[in-house]
Image (spheres, rainbow, N blue to C red):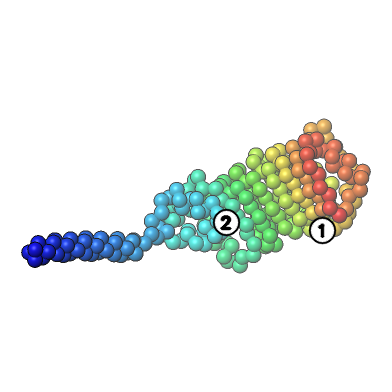
Amino acid sequence: MNGRKRQRCNSTDNYDNDGATEKLQCTSGLATSINTNKNCNTHFEDLSNELIYEVFDYLDGYHIYEGFFNLNTRFQNLCTHSHLSIEMGIAYLPKSTFQHYYNQFILPHKHQIQSLHLSDIFIIDFFSSLIENISKCSQLRTLLLDKMESKCLEHLLIDLSSLPNLSSLSIHVGYGSNKMTIYNQIFQLPALKYCKIAFEENLPLGPLPLSPNLSSPIQHFVIIDNVDLDEVNIILSCIPKIRRLSITY
């Protein structure tokens, strides 16, 4: 009986030893797996081009330029890819910084710009003096201009009429504006669906010289100005497709 008990005990001991060995092996494997995962770090540069382009979709054009353009050859090529759509919200930049940004990134890729927001006076003047470059922004869909001088705006609007995809325009017109001229030029933009215009000073609109071909495709018009009922009727006669009109005094 003692032998049998001893044999049973030995069998149990072997089972416990085997179990301990298995547990040790499993624990060792888990530790190895954990250590392997710790050492397996993914860097941004390891991402595919497609994923990097998705990241670029959330960034402003200047942030793409500042963060990636001069990083290495691969990212410079990604930044200059012909299928990359660019949105630019340019606030204040030092003149030297903007000149580098313009020459290295904006000028070669002006045909890729889809959205442009200009709020710095120097940058607005710079763009308005380069009308031939603005007219070549063939993919431009949205344009926002802050406190632009009337004369510069009038010259710019003439050239914007050649853009086939410009559907949204928001402008803040400075002092000395010729409202009649500005409205006429806006109504001649061929693809414009949304327009928001604010005037710095309160001046009468005056009669609009209506043309039989003057029919704007604007559907949503926001006016921040003091206009009377007669002026509203004149404006409405030029925007037959209007669906929403908002006037704020």
Report x, y in % for residue 192. Answer: 71, 41
The residue labelled by disc 2 is 60
92 relative to 67 in the view: left or right: right
Q: Which mark is residue 44?
A: none
Q: Amino acid at mark 1?
A: Glu
Q: In the figure, residue 30 lies in which quadrant? A: bottom left
| Disc 2/disc 1 C-alpha distance (Å) | 28 Å
In the foreground, 248 or 199: 248
Q: Quadrant of the N terminus?
A: bottom left
- Sequence-first disc among 2 and 1: 2
Q: Secondary structure at mark 1?
A: loop
User: In the picture shown, does residue 218 fall above or below 45?
Assistant: above
The residue labelled by disc 1 is 200
Q: Amino acid at mark 2?
A: Asp
User: In the picture shown, does residue 223 fall above or below 27?
Assistant: above
Report x, y in % for residue 202. Answer: 88, 56
Residue sitting at x 14%, y 64%: 9
Residue sitting at x 51%, y 53%: 56
